[in-house]
Amino acid sequence: MDQKAIHFEPRPGHQHPYDSPILNITSSETRDNLEYAASLLKKNGNTVAFPTETVYGLGADATNDEAVRNIFKAKNRPSDNPLIVHIASLRQLRDLLRPVNLESTPTVQRYQQREDSKSGETRHDDDTSSGRNSSLSETFPATSSTGPTSETRSYNVDGHQSSEFSISDIPEIYMPLIQKFWPGPLTILLDLPQNTPLSKNVTAEQRTFAVRMPNHTIALALAHLSDLPIAAPSANASGKPSPTTASHVYTDLRGRIPLILDGGSADVGLESTVVSGLCSPPRILRPGGVSLEQIRACGGVWEDCIANTSQHDDHNAEEGNKKVGAEHIPLVPGMKYKHYSPRARVLLYEPGAKGPTASDLARSVRWNGKVGLLRTRQWKEGIGRVLVAELEEEKKSYRTNMNGRRGSVLSEQELSGTIAVVERALGNDGQDISRNLFAALRDMDDHGVDSIHIEGIAEDNEGLAVMNRLRKAASVVVRNVS
Ligand code: TXA
Ligand code: MG
């Protein structure tokens, strides 16, 4: 797919470029693939995996119970962990916030039409955007044999609605964040309106829903062409590191989903920041692609924004809730589950903690096996080779000193084991470390390592999200005791 062939133009007269944008696609192959994906989403509760700037998502029609159930099934995800709704325009968000006030407006027709198509009928109603979309999805074939062309088509989906809405349908508090970070890696929490069109399976019994506008043309085009709010968690098997390439998705979900749209490697590499402006002070429920510092820099009430204090022990959110008082601290519901874990055991070294010794490496694989090392800012390049050489020396002198003595701590089997090391650099810069982290964890599994020693970073800027994911993946955290 050619992302550069997808263009969104702002509609004149709107405060935000993605209020009601106009979509142009200049490659017929890309357009055909997107239209096929959109048609899948609109039929039979299908799921489609697609790229976003953070991680790949597994999307489905957020208004269709069965479609959303299919996401949970494909991922094997616990059903009490709610999903993020992805939108391509502020107009789509307003439709979600005002479903009951729109008697006989195009929005209601749109949902009505969806009901019709669920029951097998397709209406070719050119007065409504969805009527046009459904006819398009039938006109174009599922796969394309033609290459990119310079042909351009405009999708004028939102044109007739702009004057009916004001941006103020969306809570005022979020305006600075929306202006600054959308489209982008920020998810906001909103009160669920009465008679919401969203499936109850999206919200998992919460009274709020989470929504974001991703900064990836393929994701945006999919939400725009299908004219659906798209519910999408990360497209990994539940518990695994989130996927940052199409091949990660394929590894986890092959045979379980009908389509993966390939948009290359994710640029941000960690999931979006989930933030709530519904509590005071506002809170980051999950750190991610937009940092706490960036949010505070928006000024006003956002200067006081805080991050969930329970993130250091969020293996068990219920414990966190007890400590701080369940009513007051909105924890991200999914926090109680094991997350981001490669098959190998993860040992995380806090910044400033002493790095692993030769025998730490050996012990972590019971003196025989493959060890992974992920460096960031301080550990020296080649640390793995150095430690393996030290280990051989130590074993030699151990044999010499302990020879013939009783009470030897290391068995002959341990002494005769071999340790191989796979060492990788995640980078120095916070953005590089974020981008490389999940792929590196998966790469270590591909190399068959039994344990991974990871050099942590300071928890400011991107470091807060990086360390949040690593703490969840880790079985052991080596603290800085100085
Ligand atoms: O970057 C991302 O956010 C990616 C891409 C695909 O957009 N999506 C993602 O989704 O990470 P998922 O399902 O893996 O994580 C969604 C997070 C979970 O921690 C969930 O608990 C939280 O958002 N969440 C969703 N709805 C919520 C709600 N109503 N209240 C609190 N937290 C919510
Ligand atoms: Mg996830």
Image (cartoon, rainbow, N blue to C red):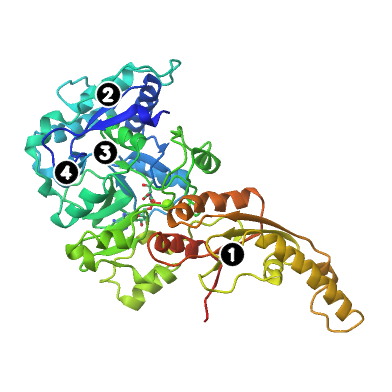
* Mark positioned earlier in the residue sequence (2 or 4): 4
Between 34 and 82, which is closer to the camera in this rendering?
A: 34
Between 81 and 482, which is closer to the camera in this rendering?
A: 482
* Mark positioned earlier in the residue sequence (4 or 3): 3
- Tag 4 residue: 94
Please, what is the three-letter code of the amino acid marked with disc 2?
A: Ser
Please, what is the three-letter code of the amino acid marked with disc 1?
A: Trp
The disc label shown at residue 467, or none: none
* Mark positioned earlier in the residue sequence (1 or 2): 2
* Mark positioned earlier in the residue sequence (1 or 4): 4
Local secondary structure at mark 4: helix
**Which is more foreground, mark 2 or mark 4?**
4
Q: Quadrant of residue 378?
A: bottom right
**Which is more foreground, mark 3 or mark 1?**
1
Q: Quadrant of residue 125?
A: top left
- The yes-or-no answer for disc 3 within 8 Å of ligand 1 is no
Whether residue 191 appears in this view of the structure is: no
Residue sitting at x 31%, y 62%: 293
- Horizontal and vertical percent for residue 276? 25, 60
- Horizontal and vertical percent for residue 110? 19, 32
In screen coordinates, is 170 left or right of 472? left
Q: Are marks 2 and 3 in contact (CB under 8 Å)?
A: no
Label 1 Cα crowd, 10 Å radius (few <14 / some 14-19 / many 20+):
some
Please, what is the three-letter code of the amino acid marked with disc 4?
A: Arg
Residue sitting at x 55%, y 51%: 440
Label 2 Cα crowd, 10 Å radius (few <14 / some 14-19 / many 20+):
many
Local secondary structure at mark 2: helix
- Tag 3 residue: 88
Work out whether 116 lies above or below 168: above
Please, what is the three-letter code of the amino acid marked with disc 3?
A: Ala
- Tag 2 residue: 134
In screen coordinates, is 417 left or right of 302? right
